[in-house]
Image (tube, grey):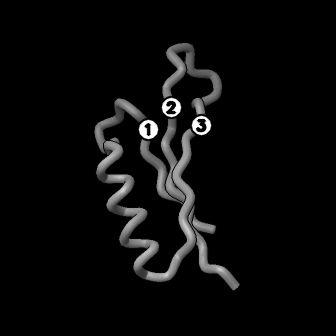
Amino acid sequence: MAVIRSIRGGTAGLNEEDRLQIARLLIKAGYSVRIGYQVIPGNAKGKKEYVIEYWEEE
């Protein structure tokens, strides 16, 4: 499984529209996709790291 990460508030952060567009392209290319987020551990401000996971079904 491969993962694309986007840290909220970072210089290379992806907005929701960007994440959805990437997911659409991956689905059209035949991948299964899951979009989610996780709180970055140890960060007092509770920044979120958004992830796009994609894989090929066997």
Disc 2 residue crowd, few under 14, some 14–19, many 20+, Cα 10 Å = some
**Which of the marked residues, 3 or 1, is nearer the chain's N terminus?**
1
Q: CA distance from mark 2 to mark 1?
A: 6 Å
Number of numbered discs on residues? 3
On the image, which quarter does residue 34 sit in? bottom right
Q: Judging from the image, what secondary structure is the residue with disc 3 in?
A: strand
Identify the residue at the far bottom of this view: 58
Q: Nearer the viewer, residue 29 or 8?
A: 29
Asked whether the residues under the numbered discs 3 and 1 touch, taking CB atoms below 8 Å apart as contact, a structural biologist would say no
User: Disc 3 or 2, which lies upstream in sequence?
Assistant: 3
- How far apart are the two marked residues, 3 and 1, measured between alpha carbons? 10 Å
Which class describes the residues within 10 Å of circle 1: few (<14), some (14-19), or many (20+)? some
Check if mark 2's residue and mark 1's residue have beta carbons within 8 Å. Answer: yes
Q: Residue at x 43, y 45 (%)?
A: 6
Marks 2 and 1, the one that precedes in the sequence? 1
Q: Residue at x 56, y 21 (%)?
A: 43
Residue 41 screen position, x and y as percent = 64, 28
| Residue 18 position within the rendered picture, expressed as x and y whole percent measured from the top left | 31, 53
Q: Nearer the viewer, mark 3 or mark 1?
A: 3
Q: CA distance from mark 3 to mark 2?
A: 6 Å
Query: Where is mark 1, residue-wise?
Result: 7
State the residue position of label 2.
48
Check disc 3 and give the amino acid type.
Gln
10 Å crowding of disc 3: few (<14), some (14-19), many (20+): few
Q: Which mark is residue 31?
A: none
- Label 2 secondary element: strand
Q: Position of residue 49 (x, y in %)?
A: 51, 38
Q: Amino acid type of disc 1?
A: Ile
Whether label 3 touches label 2, CB < 8 Å: yes
Instruction: Return the residue at label 3.
Output: 38
At a point 63% along the width and 68% down the height, the residue shown is: 1
